[in-house]
Image (cartoon, helix red, strand yellow):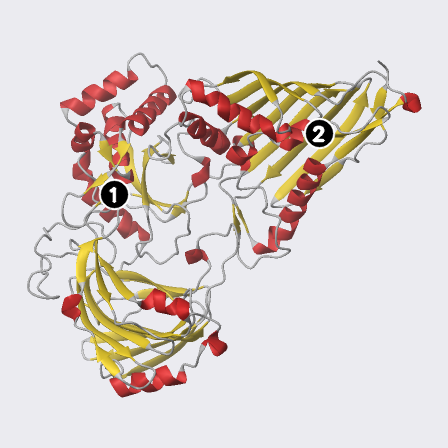
């Protein structure tokens, strides 16, 4: 019996008795289920999943054979459109897809069979990565409200296209188990991630997996409850996971990945992350062989550089800027099979794993100990060592044994060797001895700064003039560089004017300067001299002045993910930002002679685990001087800290809307 179980919020029944393989429900059973499913008044949805059942048999080599029965009932007109064409995605180099049955259950009791042979097999829409994935599409007869569609399919292979030694070009010849050339990513091992969440209601979902007795399986349930049982069936242990009456998943604005919060089961026969780390290293190591061309290019890129930091940065930049992001297949099991570094150098193209692999080779050619790394960009990885990764990066092992991360995929137009947008991501370093699951380093607000600095003058007629400078570092800087790189020098003025227009639609940019997008000698800055007529409305006795820098010129580029995140009072799911952030607004505003503020906004000071804000303003002679700093300390704000975060954002928004009333002594304007 398997001995390594990981159980989350799960109700478990362990039955150590023989089990007969369950047959998928028959026609009469499904007809009764469809009738009992109810209508739109019950579910308030366009359609409802009456049954979703997947039965997987894991073979000794780790290949899985999954039989799926799915029945969907149409409840409203929108459901007719959604179910009129059934789609099934697959990758012929990693799995075989067979449509066994398509039936339409009419509301009046009739059943119509749809010939599976009418399915169209065509390339799946692709952009940037061309690995040959395909989709089978089959059109069903015209549906009406109350009808239901049943599909039964068999998918053999594995759902993640990573590593294999064999050629899978003939995988589809001769039926679903004729694909003997298919190999799982880790020979002899199997893993899966099963979502128990849906965009429409689900009455019943069941996932069954049959594993040989001598293949220990570990699993864990996350973000919810699932009923589970473990039984014996001959030479297999059968694990069954069931959940009924699943409500549609309710998302929230700016939330983390749905996989981080929706109910799921993660399963794996891999014993631990160290094993996966060693496998990743062994399978990719041949790709990093050094050729004369690689050595020569590395020497050329680092020529004349003295320090290790200069060499690392130069190599990372070269791969980032010179290897375009495009994926082309080398055959079976693309994914984590890194293309040979010499091929990537020759072709000047590859996806993340290929760019990372070339950087590994060039770093080694320069004398660094470098390894490739698995990571998940944008979501969490569970403790169960199933495949949960979507990105590959590069690492350097320091003399003390610690690791430094580099990412040539996210580095174009960036001064960051490792993007702060990738902070606290799960990573597994591929090394000979094996490494545990760990996280990338935290990058605080001080590393991701946006500073608005102004020196402005208000005239008697309310015209504002002066100069302002935007200075950025970290993720905001990268965003600004990439935005500026879309335009040539002549068109870039329009971008400057668009940002300056936050001061007023009639703002006239007198002079401007923008750091070149590939000038990495310092922070990215935008400077401009401008004039905004009628900035301060009022008359000869009083005017109302908004604090100019608090208008956050170019803010949509450098902090667009921050604005509006104070919406709901509470959150069920964590809030996600692109990165931590420090927003700093500072200005000296000179008032007309004889004018002064009737009153000034009070100082503010807020601080907490997720965010902090300080604000102060003072009058010094004819000048108003103010300083506001906002620190967003987390890029994933948990629900229990959201209220504190929200109070800071609300305070910031109030300051952005604040107008200072200024008056002239005696109520008469000086000419």
Quarter of the image for residue 55 reads bottom left
Q: Is residue 452 above or below residue 634?
A: above
Mark 2 vs mark 1: which is more N-terminal? 1
Q: Kindly identify the residue that appears in the image at 58 percent across and 47 percent down.
A: 565
For the N terminus, the image quarter is bottom left
SS class of the residue under badge 1? Answer: strand
Q: CA distance from mark 2 to mark 1?
A: 47 Å
Quarter of the image for residue 490 reads top left
Q: Kindly identify the residue that appears in the image at 31 percent across and 11 percent down.
A: 304
Q: Tag 2: Cα neighbours inside 10 Å, few (<14), some, or many (≥20)?
A: many
Percent x, y of residue 276: 27, 51
Q: Is residue 420 above or below residue 196?
A: above
Asked if one can make out residue 556 in the rendered structure from this viewpoint, the answer is: yes
Q: Which residue is mark 2?
A: 547
SS class of the residue under badge 2? Answer: loop
Q: Nearer the viewer, residue 332 or 90?
A: 90
Q: Nearer the viewer, residue 433 or 293?
A: 293
Q: Is residue 178 above or below residue 32?
A: above
Percent x, y of residue 200: 42, 68
* Residue 641 tag number: none
For the C terminus, the image quarter is top right
Q: Specify whether 267 is left or right of 618.
A: left
Q: Tag 1: Cα neighbours inside 10 Å, few (<14), some, or many (≥20)?
A: some
Q: Specify whether 671 is left or right of 303.
A: right
Percent x, y of residue 625: 74, 23
Q: Which residue is mark 1?
A: 129
Percent x, y of residue 619: 81, 23
Q: Nearer the viewer, residue 626 or 642?
A: 626
Asked if one can make out residue 63 in the rendered structure from this viewpoint, the answer is: no
């Amino acid at each position: 019996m398997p001995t390594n179980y990981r159980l989350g919020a799960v109700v478990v029944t362990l039955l150590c008795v023989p089990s007969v393989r369950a047959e998928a429900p028959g026609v009469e059973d499904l007809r009764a289920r469809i009738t009992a499913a109810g209508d739109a008044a019950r579910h308030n949805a366009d359609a409802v999943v009456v049954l979703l059942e997947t039965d997987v048999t894991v073979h000794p080599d780790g290949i899985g054979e999954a039989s799926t029965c799915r029945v969907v009932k149409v409840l409203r007109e929108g459901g007719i459109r959604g179910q009129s064409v059934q789609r099934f995605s697959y990758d012929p180099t990693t799995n075989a897809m067979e449509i066994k049955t398509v039936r339409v259950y009419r509301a009046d009791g009739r059943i119509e069979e749809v010939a599976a042979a009418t399915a169209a097999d065509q390339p799946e829409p692709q952009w940037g990565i061309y690995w040959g994935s395909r989709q089978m599409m089959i059109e069903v007869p015209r549906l009406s409200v109350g009808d239901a569609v049943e599909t039964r399919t068999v998918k053999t292979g594995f759902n993640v296209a990573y590593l294999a030694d064999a050629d899978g070009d003939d995988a589809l010849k001769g039926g679903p188990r004729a694909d003997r050339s298919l190999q799982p990513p880790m020979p002899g091992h199997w893993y899966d991630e099963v979502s128990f969440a849906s965009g429409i209601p689900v009455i019943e979902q069941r996932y069954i997996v049959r594993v040989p007795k001598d293949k220990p399986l570990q699993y864990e349930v996350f973000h919810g409850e699932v009923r589970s049982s473990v039984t014996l069936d001959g030479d297999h242990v059968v694990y069954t996971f069931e959940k009924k009456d699943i409500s549609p998943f309710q998302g929230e604005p700016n939330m983390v990945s749905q996989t981080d919060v929706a109910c799921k089961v993660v399963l794996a026969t891999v014993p631990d992350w160290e094993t996966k780390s060693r496998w990743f290293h062994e399978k990719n190591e041949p790709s990093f062989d050094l050729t004369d061309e690689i050595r020569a290019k590395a020497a050329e890129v680092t020529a004349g550089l003295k320090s290790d930091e200069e060499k690392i940065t130069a190599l990372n930049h070269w791969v980032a800027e010179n290897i375009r992001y495009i994926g082309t297949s080398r055959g079976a099991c693309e994914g984590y099979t890194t293309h040979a570094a010499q091929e990537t150098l020759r072709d000047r193209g590859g996806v993340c794993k290929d760019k990372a692999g070339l950087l590994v080779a060039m770093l080694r050619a320069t004398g660094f100990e470098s390894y490739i790394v698995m990571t998940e960009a944008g979501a969490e990885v569970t403790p169960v060592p199933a495949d949960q990764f979507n990105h590959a990066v590069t690492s350097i092992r320091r003399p003390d044994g610690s690791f430094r991360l580099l990412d040539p995929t996210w580095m174009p137009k960036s001064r960051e060797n490792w993007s702060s947008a990738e902070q606290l991501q799960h990573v597994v370093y591929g090394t000979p001895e094996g490494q545990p699951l760990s996280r990338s380093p935290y990058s605080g607000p001080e590393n991701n700064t946006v500073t608005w600095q102004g020196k402005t003058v208000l005239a008697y007629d309310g015209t504002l003039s002066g100069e302002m400078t935007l200075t950025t570092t970290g993720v905001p800087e990268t965003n600004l560089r990439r935005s500026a790189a879309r335009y040539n020098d002549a068109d870039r003025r329009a971008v400057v004017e668009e940002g300056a227009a936050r001061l007023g639609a009639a703002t006239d940019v007198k002079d401007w300067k923008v750091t070149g997008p590939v000038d990495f000698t310092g922070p990215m800055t935008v400077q401009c001299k401008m004039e905004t007529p009628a900035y301060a409305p009022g008359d000869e006795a009083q005017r109302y002045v908004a604090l100019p820098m608090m208008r956050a010129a170019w803010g949509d580029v450098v902090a667009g993910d921050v604005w509006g995140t104070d919406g709901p009072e509470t959150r069920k799911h964590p809030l996600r930002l692109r990165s931590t952030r420090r927003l700093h607004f500072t200005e000296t505003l000179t008032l007309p002679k004889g004018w002064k503020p009737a009153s000034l906004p009070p100082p503010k000071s807020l601080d907490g685990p997720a965010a902090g804000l300080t604000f102060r303003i003072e009058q010094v002679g004819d000048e108003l001087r103010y300083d506001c700093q906002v620190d967003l300390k987390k890029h994933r704000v948990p629900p229990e800290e959201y209220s504190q975060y929200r109070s800071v954002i609300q305070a910031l928004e109030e300051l952005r809307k604040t107008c200072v009333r200024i008056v002239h002594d005696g109520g008469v304007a000086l000419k």
